[in-house]
Amino acid sequence: MKKVILLFFVYMLLSPFVHGQSTGELEMQFRQLNQALQAEQAALDSLNDLMEIKAKDIAYEKKSALPDQNKIIKWMSHAVTLSHQIKDRQRRIANARSEIEICRSRLEHMYTETIDSLRQLERSGKYIGDIYELRNHLLIWTEKRIFLTPLVSTLSFDPQKVQRTELTDASDPMDRAIIEDYLTNALKEIDAHIQVVTGTRKEFEETADLRRRTSDFINEAHEQGRISSMTRSQAFRNTGTDIFGNPVGQMFTAVQVRSVAGLMQQLNTGTLMSHTNKSLMSAKTAITQEEYIQLLRQAENLLRTYRSIVQKKLK
């Protein structure tokens, strides 16, 4: 009965009558949009490959002793067609990404509303249902939200170039203004990355804490005889799925690791790294949640260190 009460509560939170479109429908739309984007990207990659081959053919023919003008004209015409197709694919990819971001934003909002409501229910002290079921749902929706968070991107500027750049090197006022603008924009981008990395780290720390509290609660209930060993085992396995329908738990994919590692490698210009850091950055398999949080902390510290370097250059 208690479980039914909680499921009804969650259903009301996610009901299409409340949001206009159910979470399940939005998740399906998000998956379909991503699949469509992957297909468009694959088609664009193929077109770019063809364009590269055609460009090489044209260049090779032009350099030959007796270039065949008919071949060159034919290939150049084909290249123009390919160029139009590439531009069309690029436009479709841009539109797809825009639709994905709108869908992602809506899903994130729905997840956040559900999580906040479940947290409020947990903290109220008035919930009479099964507290394990409540915390388990809270854990599942929190994990769904953090797996929806975009990957950490690399910096658009060259950190080594920024390190070599000095305002004192510019004697001309115009050159000095250009350098100052370059460093200011770099500082803004670093601040934005710090915000993203810090926010991601806090989300994962919160989820890790929630998982620990849920685990402690289950173990305590098992020791007190309130749940059986079988129920305890099932509880530890019941962690839900991510936005793409894959099981989520304490292991994180190499894609997520490398997104953070890529940023750290970009910033680590001649900086010695610890053995642990090196092993995490070169990870080819999944790592634990705690290791991923550690990696995010290291990236955050690295960004803050680099920020202080850029700030000094602007003084």
Image: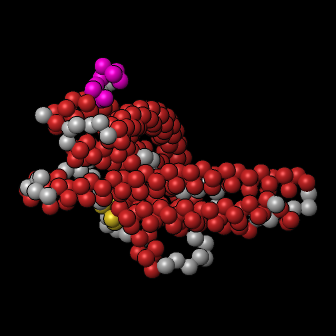
Q: Nearer the viewer, residue 236 or 48?
A: 236
Indicate whether 229 appears above or below 90.
Answer: below
- Residue 239, given in percent of the width and then of the height, sits at 23, 50
Please give the count of numbered marks on the rendered protein.
0
Q: Is residue 226 at all visible to an observer of this figure?
A: yes
Left or right: residue 119 compared with residue 102:
left
Q: Quadrant of the C terminus?
A: bottom right
**Image: magenta residue range:** 12-20
Left or right: residue 259 compared with residue 142:
right
Q: Is residue 101 within the magenta segment?
A: no
Left or right: residue 81 compared with residue 158:
left
Say which residue appears at 70% left-offset and 51% top-offset: 185
Q: Nearer the viewer, residue 36 or 1?
A: 1
Q: Nearer the viewer, residue 289 or 94?
A: 289
Say which residue appears at 46% left-offset and 54% top-offset: 202
Q: Main secondary structure of the magenta part?
A: helix
Q: How is the image coloured?
A: secondary structure
- Residue 7, given in percent of the width and then of the height, sits at 20, 34
- Residue 103, given in percent of the width and then of the height, sits at 40, 33
Q: Is residue 71 at all visible to an observer of this figure?
A: no
Q: Nearer the viewer, residue 64 or 239?
A: 239
Say which residue appears at 39% left-offset and 34% top-offset: 113
Say which residue appears at 22% left-offset and 37% top-offset: 128
- Residue 212, given in percent of the width and then of the height, sits at 30, 58
Task: Return the residue found at the far right.
Answer: 172
Image quadrant in which you'd find residue 220: bottom left
Q: Quadrant of the N terminus?
A: top left
